[in-house]
Amino acid sequence: MVAFIMVSLIGLLGVAAVWPFAKRRPVGAPLSWGQAMAGAMYVFFLFLWWYGVIPHQWLTYSSNELGWTIDNILIEPNAWFPITISWLIIRDVIVLAIYGIGVGFHVAAWAVWQDRGKPKPVSVPASRYGRPLVREP
């Protein structure tokens, strides 16, 4: 349990570290070879962590400590539901959710990085009828 929580926290902190760095780095700044390799290694580390280490720790924890194996049946077949569902299936669905969370974090981090130089939209005050209160030149 401790290992799964720790690797999950390291993964969350790794993804969260992208946001402050994206705010600091200017859009057109030159990039040295060493900086590019360090960034590539960091991204590779996050991919390896989210798609290898975190799911592995969950599978180890759920199989060994929780005992979610094929032998533990959650739902047995009956007249209305003819499918057997074991805890192993629930374990694998949770792994699928971990992969989905990892994909979501990676897409969000790339979107923040790609949109870091775009200007913020200026809002024009509007009347309660939805018309702008200022005249356009």
Image (spheres, rainbow, N blue to C red):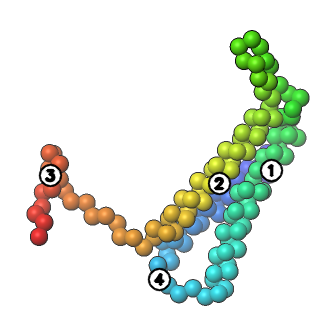
Task: Quickly name the residue at label 3.
Answer: 131
- The Cα–Cα distance between marks 2 and 1, rounded to whole angstroms, is 15 Å
Pick the front one: 62 or 44: 44
Pick the front one: 131 or 81: 81
Numbered label attached to residue 57: 1
Numbered label attached to residue 137: none
- The Cα–Cα distance between marks 1 and 3, rounded to whole angstroms, is 56 Å
Mark 1 Cα shell of 10 Å, populated few (<14), some (14-19), many (≥20): some
Mark 3 Cα shell of 10 Å, populated few (<14), some (14-19), many (≥20): few
Q: Which three-letter amino acid code belongs to the residue tagged 2?
A: Gly
- Across and down, in percent, residue 4 comes to 77, 49
- The mark nearer the N terminus, 2 or 1, is 1
Q: Which three-letter amino acid code belongs to the residue tagged 4?
A: Gly
Mark 4 Cα shell of 10 Å, populated few (<14), some (14-19), many (≥20): few
Task: Quickly name the residue at label 2.
Answer: 102
SS type, badge 4: loop
Question: Going 77% across and 38% down the picture, which residue do you hit?
Answer: 91
Q: Is residue 76 above or below residue 128?
A: above
Please report contact status of discs 2 and 1: CB closer than 8 Å, yes or no: no
- The mark nearer the N terminus, 1 or 4, is 4
Q: Is residue 74 visible?
A: no
- The mark nearer the N terminus, 1 or 3, is 1
Q: Nearer the viewer, mark 1 or mark 3?
A: 3
Task: Quickly name the residue at label 4.
Answer: 28
